Amino acid sequence: GGNIMNGSPAMDTGAPLMVLNARVELRTVDHTRYLDVSELWIGPGRTAATDDELCTAVLLPLRPERSGSGYVRLEYRRAMEIAVVGAAAAVTLAPDNDALLSASVALSAVAPTMVQVELPEDLVGRPVDDEVLAAVANAASQQSRPIADVRAGSDYRRHTVGVMAKRALAAAAARAQGENLGVPLNRSLGIGAS
């Protein structure tokens, strides 16, 4: 749980764990408690764990049939440990068609903590098409609160996280449809991994 308990808003594991509805097990000598990861991170480098609690497990619920997930990050060089922006998505599709039964998107490196994107309610029941992907990109961009630093300006991050959210949702939907999809690599931008 070291990376998770570090509380960095740019960690690669945070957004994927959020969209997968992960929980952490926190233990002390005297007690054990469980916390949704969405409630764990309370600020940059800060968690809701007490000083004497240790993360002893990360629990992931089983996903329904026709579910898929994806994570995409922007980095400038392959050796970067911290994403400039990142987006994760998880979807479940209807058993008889490709309509969305559920969708979840979370963002990293664009706010003081991971951001769970509030998606438009009218996406449920629709296939993942260009219109749905555009709505996801727009929601992600609008709900991000990026900083400007040496790695990127806030406007650039706000735009790019929309692109990453769209790509993550498209990858999640493709995997839910049964595609064996690797992690995309864009050598010019350093997106993904080979």
Image (tube, grey):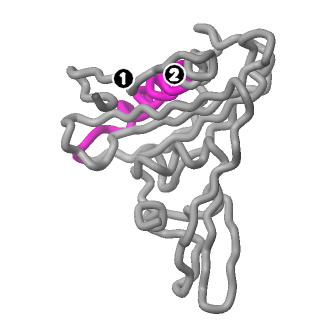
Q: Kindly identify the residue that appears in the image at 79 percent across and 17 percent down.
A: 95
Residue 85, position as x, y percentages in the image: 39, 38
Disc 1 to disc 2, C-alpha distance: 9 Å
Image quadrant containing the C terminus: top left
Q: Kindly identify the residue that appears in the image at 50 percent across and 27 percent down.
A: 168
Could you tell whether 70 is left or right of 85 in the image?
Answer: right
98 or 168, which is in the foreground? 98
In the image, residue 3 sits, relative to residue 149, either above or below, namely below
Q: Are marks 1 and 2 in contact (CB under 8 Å)?
A: yes
In the image, residue 87 sits, relative to residue 127, either above or below, namely below
Residue 46, position as x, y percentages in the image: 49, 69
In the image, residue 79 sits, relative to residue 27, either above or below, namely above
Disc nearer the start of the sequence (1/2): 2
Q: Which amino acid is tagged 2?
A: Ala
Q: Residues within 10 Å of mark 1 (few under 14, many from 20)?
A: some
Q: Which amino acid is tagged 1?
A: Pro
Q: Which residues are magenta?
A: 150-171
Residue tagged 1: 184
Residue 123 in sight here: no
Identify the disc placed on residue 171: 2
